[in-house]
Every structure is written in structure tokens, then in C-alpha cells.
Amino acid sequence: MSKTVLVIKWAVFILIFITSSALCQYDMVEIDNSVFGDPARPPSVFEHDAHNENAGLDECNICHHVYEDGKKLEYESSEDMYCSDCHSVKSENGSPSLRKAFHMNCKGCHLEQKAGPVLCGECHRK
Amino acid sequence: MGDPAVQNDAAVEAKVVDEGIDRGVEALTPERIESVINQVFEKETGARLQAYVETCVHCGLCSEACHFYLSNDKDPKFSPVGKVKQTIWEMVKRKGRVDADFIRNAVEVAHTQCNLCKRCAMYCPFGIDIAYLMLVVRRICHKLGVTPLYIQDTVNSHSVTMNQMWVKEDEWIDTLQWQEEEGRDEIPDLRIPVEKEGADIMYSVIAPEPKFQAGLIYQAAVLMNVAGMNWTMPATPGWDNSDMAMYTGDNEIMARVKRSHFETARRLRVNKIVMGECGHAFRSIYDMGNRQLGWKMPPIPVQHAIDFYDELLREGKIRIARKFEKSVTLHDPCNIVRGRGLHEKSRSVVRAMCDNFIEMHPNREHNYCCAAGGGVINCGPPYKQKRMAGNRVKAEQLAATKAEVLIAPCHNCHSGLEDIIHHYKLDMEVKFILDILYECMEKPE
Amino acid sequence: MHTIYQFVSGPLAWIAFILFAGGCIYRVAALLHTVYQKERFIFSYMSWRHSLNSIFHWIIPFASVNSRKHPVMTVVTFVFHISLILVPIFLLSHIVLWDEAWNITWPALPDGLADVMTVLVILSCVFFLARRIVLPEVKYVTSASDYVILAIVAAPFITGFYAYHQWPGYSFVMILHILAGEIMLIAIPFSRLRHMLFSVFTRAYMGSEFGGVRHARDW
């Protein structure tokens, strides 16, 4: 194999790699934890579409809930908002902190359903 | 896994002939052993024993506190916790179901391999009082009738005569009068006031003083007369402040002996008891005998000789005429240093008398024990060789000072250190503080 | 898996904490009760000043003569005990669980530091084990229970370390970790680990006797 061919081969390979990962941004694979600043653990693994398909979730507000006066509103949903819009990093106004909100939303449901990860390292994979 | 608690080979090899133990062990039955041990555990001990046994994490950090351990080439059987393992732990674990051989070993460990000096209490990170545990073992052995013959004889003497040496009442009074007479050669108006009610001080000694060290009473009389003290000595039983019952676990006799001593002082209406240079007697009066009688602290103020000398020197009642010339080193007896913190006072007295004072190391609370106290020397000749082998570190410590004179302000320490010095062929003379103080003090012409 | 997790982190955790707290209270209360019943005189000798003085000299490294005589042991034992107590309480993952269960939270140790401290605990346990095997004066007084206690203490840290690094068998080891922690908690009042509770009292009593009656240092 000549040197040029090798270089081209590598260039193509790298290009495909970059574009593919860029495209996948839409197909969510992990929770965006940038709001934490200096997160203590790796971002939680979460493949949105696969999860919902797997879990048979049709209603968005099962996860993307809206609470008012401590009660979940049955017909409201919040998929157009960031979780951190309501749940700040530090707990405020009685709404759980962002970290706790994530944990309760995911782990809480997993324990209820007896399905899905519940241990730290099952989501925050190294 | 640890070695078995009783190593039979070693036990046979090291077996000593002690009639008190041999006859006592012969009379033991398993039922008696079990019932006595449990009786002591249930009726006479409590949270302390339980906490000490349950808290110990078997770390072995107490080992280097013990002169027996250090001197026996760090044989773990001689470490404080090693002795606890051979005695109390097994008794607790087996709920008292131990055999006569076990008791034979236990009595030897508790009576002749531990001086109850409490140095290990300062080395245990938890402050476990191993000396207390050894005393519990001695108490059990006492109740089983298994106590070394020699020390049991002194306890018998206490019980019959209220003094340790079978000194009869007339002999005692005679000795005081004899020393008064001797003293008058030196100080013509010297007195040993006997039975003087309302005196300020009752001076008390241990029975070996009238028995074979009467010169010490002479020296004390000179000191009292020169210092102009208002003092007295009793003519009745109760004059002896010593107490070997404390060391055999015969608490009932300890209480009788101490009661008699305190009541004698009360009868003479003195303000305080001043006692000679003895350590164990101080422990008995200040720490153990009073508690057995229900007194938190002694019912009458008690002053040890060192404290008394220091007071006389500071107040100028005794003056030093000429300094002692030889180089001296000072031994810190457990019962008045770890037992009463008199180490700085003894140093101030020694410095007042001697120009050439050399510290031994370690010193003060951390000084090595003499290996004689705690009733060990009183267990007599059968154990002397072991006592010598068991305190090589003391000999090394003494030799390192290169001092000509060793000051040992305690009777047991004094005798024990004399043995050590002879055994290890050290060129050293042992003296009480009073020996030197008497020699160096200003006396009327 | 979920059922096991819920069991070990639910009812078992309750049992562990109740036995730990209840056991500790019972042990101390029983100790004081026995003192009251059989050796009441001890209370009359207790002194706050001398107790604290003695305790401080023994919880500060190298403040006692014996701790200076064994510098390696002193460093190891202090590092061990400090890490042993701080890591479980201030580990982020544990705080998250407290937050979820009881809505209480407190500052956490950085994970990296906690990881180092965990390794130190494990190495200390190895050191203690080696002492037991190698040093004659320790070996002589060592019984089987000493090894069991050492294993009980080491287990939560070994499994915790393994789980934190998510090595193979992660979820199984996590369950073991939770169980190991619970066993250790229960063992504290019911084994010689109760020196955690009693040593304060034995030290305080010795300090009071030495300071108040004997007028001598006990360190």
C-alpha cells in the first residue's frame, strides 16, 4: 500500500467518525450534565428513544412532568424545557435539586417498575 | 492463631517449689475453682473487668511497658497482655471452668511476674488497667487458698499482730526506746514521743524497720527533733503502715490493717500521718486500703516522706550543712510517682542535698519498675532468680548512669535494687533519701 | 436484582442501623448501669478535666510516649481510623442515598480523595494483619476472632473500592458492599469493635485516676 492511499484512508475514516458522532447528537445517548460545572461522575448513560421503546412509554410527561403546589399535573408536560429550568443545582423553593431530581426520576421509576439500572455505576459508567 | 495460653513444656521446666502454692493446688477441685471464679466475677467485679476484657483489641502495644517482657528477650508470655491472656481471658472465656494446672500457672504469673506497677496502664491506648486485672487474679487465687507461702506468711502476721513481721508489742516499744537512747548520744535531748495525744504528726513505718532496719527510726527521730516537729509514734498495734494483704487479694485483712492504722491516728488526735520512705504502704493508705474501708480519700491527711522532706527543706526547718559529694541517681518508685506524682519533689530534695545528680532514663512516670514491689519480693527466695532475670533492663538503665549512689526512696525498691546491683555486679550503693539527708543536714553541735 | 437491591438497601439497612444505634446505646447504658450497681465509687473519681486531658493526649498523634515509640504504627492507626470514619460518612454516593431517603444532605469528600483514603484503609488492614502474623507479642495474643474482626472492617472498603472502579461483576459486588457495610455496623456494638464506644470511658477513667488521685500523667 502506498503512503498516499494510507493517508486518504485515514482521512476518510476520521471524517466519518466526526460526522457520525455529530449526527448522533440528535439521537441522545447520555444526559447533558454541563450545567453541573464540575460533575463528580461521568454523565449518565441514557438512550432516549431506545429507552422509551423498551419501556413502552408513550406519554412524555411520565418523565417530563410539571408540578404545581407539590402535585403532578396530569395533562401538562415539559419536554420543551430544560430540567434545570425548574431544578437548579441547589435545591430551591421545595423543588428537589437537579441531581436529586434526576435520581428520583430515573431510579425511582426503575425501582417501582423493577426494571432498569438502580446502582450508581449502572448509569454513571466509566 | 495464637499459641495456647498454658505452654506445658515451659511450665514444667520453670516449676518452682512453693509449698503455699503446691498444697493449695492439691486441694483444688474443678467445682471449687468454677464457683470461686464466678463468685468473684459476679459479686466482686463489674463494669471495669468487663470493659477491660471486651475493649482490648489485642494490639500488643502495652508490651514494651513491662520490664519482665523487655528483660526476658521480649518473650510474649511476659507482656502485660500476654499475662492477661494466661489468666483472666481464659477464666472469662471458659466461665471459670479451668483446671488446677491453669490456676498454678495463673498464680505464678499474677504474683511473681507482675509488680502491679501500672506502667502498662500508661502504654495502653485505651488506658486498660492491667494491674487491676492481675489483682483480680490474685483475689481469685487467695479465695482458692493458693498464694505463695512467703507472702501468705506476712499476711498471717498482719492478721495476728497488725504488723507484717510478727513484731510483738513489747519489742516494738523497746525498739523505739532503744533508738531514743542511741539518739541521745548525738542529740542529748532527743525524744521519740510515744503515745503523745494531740501531737501534730503521727509518724508511721513499716514493720521491717523495727525488725532489722532500726537505724531508719533513729534517723527519722533526729530529723523530727532537729526540725522541731510536734510528733508521736503509737505504742499500740496500728503503728505499722505496711500491707501485704493488699497484694494477696486478701481485702478483708487489708481493711482490718488499715482501719487499725487510721483509728490509731484518730485516737492520738493527730493532724496528719507522715510515713517513711515506703511505696506500697503509701498505696495502701492513699489508694487501696482507704477505698476498701469506703473512704474516697484517706480519712486523715497522709504525707509521704518525700513530700515531708521537701516541705521541711523549703520552709527552712532543715538546712543542708554540706552537700553530698558522690554522684547520685534517683529511682522513681511506682507507688509514689505513678501513684502520687512525687517525682518533682523527690528531685528538688535530691538537688538540695547533692551536687552531682544524674538522671536515669526513662525517668519520672516512665521509670522502669524495681521488679520487687507489688508483693513480688515478698514471695521470697523461690522466685529470686526469675526476679533477677526479669529486670535486666533496670540493671542496664542503672549502669548507664555511672552514678556511685542509687537513691531509692521506697523499701521494696531499695531491697529489690540491691539484689539487682549484686546480681548484675554493678558498682553502686543504694541509699534512702533519709540516709543522705541525715548525713548532710545541719545538726545542733 | 431489583428485589435484592431493595431488600439489602431497605429492610436490611433498617435492621443494620437499628441494631447499630440500639446496640451502641444499649452497650453504653449497660456499662454505666453496671458501674452504678456494682462500682458506684467510679463516678466519684471521674473528672471532666482529667478525662479530656487524657483523651486529648491519646487522640493526637505523637502526644503520648508510646505513640512516639511506635511511629509507623501511630501513623497507620491514625490514618486508618480517620479514613475509616470519614469516608463512609462523607462519600458522595452515600450522601446521595441519604438525600433520596431522608432529604438531608451535607458536603462530600471529592471522589478522588475518598478513593485514596479507601486504599489507605485497605493497606492499613494489610499492615494490621501483617503485625498479627509477624510480631510475636501480637501473635501470642491473637485469636481467630481478631482475624474475623479485621475482615469485617476491611470488607466494605475492598468491595467499595472495587465497585467504585466498576470492574467486572459490578452489580454483584455492589450488593456485597452494602451487605459488608451492614455487617460492620452491626458488629460494632456486638464485637470487640465496641472499643469505639468503650475506649472513651476506659481512657477517661484512667485519666481521672491518674490526674485526680495520682497526680501523674498517663500518656
Image: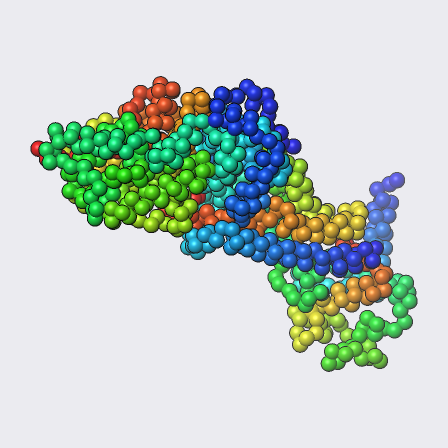
Q: Horizontal placement of C80 versus C44: left or right?
A: right
Residue at 38 percent across and 46 percent down: it is B290
Q: Residue furthest left?
A: B445
Residue at 31 percent across and 46 percent down: it is B263
In the rendered image, which quarter is residue B253 located in? top left
Residue at 51 percent across and 55 percent down: it is C36
In the rendered image, which quarter is residue C13 located in? bottom right
Q: Horizontal placement of A97 versus B388: left or right?
A: right
In the rendered image, which quarter is residue C4 located in? bottom right
Q: Considering the image in quadrants, where does the N terminus of chain C appear?
A: bottom right
Where does residue A2 sit, x and y in percent of width and height? Answer: 86, 41
Q: Considering the image in quadrants, where does the C terminus of chain C appear?
A: top left
* Number of numbered discs: 0
Q: Please name the colour scheme applied to the rendered image.
A: rainbow
Q: Horizontal placement of B79 versus C110: left or right?
A: left
Where does residue B147 sit, x and y in percent of width and height? Answer: 48, 30
Please name whichever residue, C106 or B323, is drawn nearer the observer in this view of the structure: B323
Residue at 40 percent across and 32 percent down: it is B156
Work out whether residue A47 can be spotted. Answer: no
Where does residue B22 sit, x and y in percent of width and height? Answer: 52, 24
Where does residue B286 sit, x and y in percent of width and height? Answer: 36, 44
Work out whether residue A63 can be spotted. Answer: yes
Please name whichever residue, A107 or B398, is drawn nearer the observer in this view of the structure: B398
User: Height in image: C34 above or below B378?
Assistant: below
